[in-house]
Image: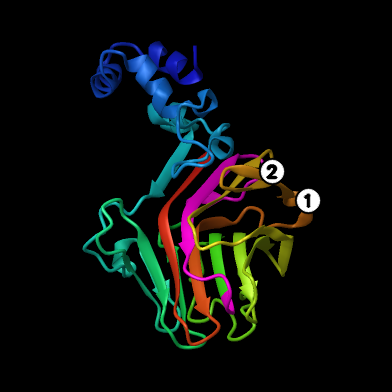
Amino acid sequence: MSKSSQIFNSLSNHRTGRALRNLFGSNAPENVKTLFDVKDSQMASAAGAGLSPLVWDSCPRGQILVDPTTGHFIGDDFTFTNAESYTTAKDYVLAGANGTFAATAADPNGVALLTAPAVDNNECNVNHAINPGVIKLDATKDWWFEARVKINQITTAQGVFVGLIEDSITMGTTFMTDNTMAMKVQDNIGFQILAATNTAAIWQAVHTLTARVAVDATLTTATAAWVKLGMKSVQGVVSYFVNGVPLAATTSAAVNYPLDKYVVPAFATKTGSAAANTLSVDWWYAAQTR
């Protein structure tokens, strides 16, 4: 019997138990297993558009559902945003020279679109406005993060960031430096494209505390197709994933990544030419144990 099914069956028939059985139907334990037990490969796939099994296999999402003291699991799939243009009031902080952050028109699944208009060094960056953050980069409390994103070009100069950034400081007008595309020194951990000249785009695994560190400067070659970028920290060791496949690169508190910082999801794109840059975000999800 799966862990989620064991937990579900252990609930007595009081109000919570009755409500969950009404929610999941007459075959509730099996339905819970299907929805929440990644280890049984019944939820999503590495190649699919949903959460990646190997990123989330150790995350007790089903247990969190029935026992919030286990941890938290939150995210945004932008489903309810087809008529919205994001501002600070819409849960995100938007910055960057001339950048816009809005829903992708006519997409029923919900996709948020960051656009840096077609002038050199224009920028769009957004970070979630939650305080004090969705994750604390704790060496003892496991955490998970994954986002599905897409860039529009892979050959001209540009800067891109997808990941987690310190919650107490907004990314600001120039999160990435004009022309060099170097990110400002702000606590973060995630994925970056750093292309100061016209060159093939490469995703890097990075983190910043007192200085930027490239954990893997050639993590994977970027494409203009959808890609899932994920991280998980188990016992203080962070692993990186591309399309659900674990990469060899890891980092840990021992190498000075931004330990004990509260962080929020963050996304950024910057132009390096007179062509517009876009970064589409299908969804992001994050979790952490208590």
**SS of the residue under disc 1:** helix
Disc 2 marks which amino acid?
Answer: Gly
Q: Are marks 1 and 2 in contact (CB under 8 Å)?
A: yes
In this view of the protein, which residue sits in the foreground, 187 or 30? 30
| Residue at 55% in and 61% down | 223
Q: Position of residue 18 (x, y in %)?
A: 25, 17
> Where residue 236 is drawn, which disc sits there?
2
Image x and y of residue 228, in percent = 52, 50
In the rendered structure, which segment of residues is drawn in magenta? 132-158
Image: 75 above or below 54: below
Residue 153 belongs to magenta span: yes
Badge 2 crowding class, 10 Å Cα cut-off, few under 14, some 14 to 19, many 20 or more, is some
3D distance between C-alphas at marks 1 and 2: 9 Å
Question: Quick check: 289 left or right of 80?
Answer: right
- Secondary structure of the residue carrying numbered label 2: loop
Q: Where 196 falls versus 254 (above or below)?
A: below
Q: Is residue 133 visible?
A: no
The single residue placed furthest to the right in the displayed view is 254
Residue drawn at the location 42% of the way across and 63% of the way down: 280
In the image, taking residue 137 as reference, residue 257 lies left or right, namely right
For disc 1, the marked residue is 254
- Answer with mark 1 or mark 2, whichever residue precedes in sequence: 2
Q: Residue 151's x, y, as percent? A: 49, 65
Q: Amino acid at mark 1?
A: Ala
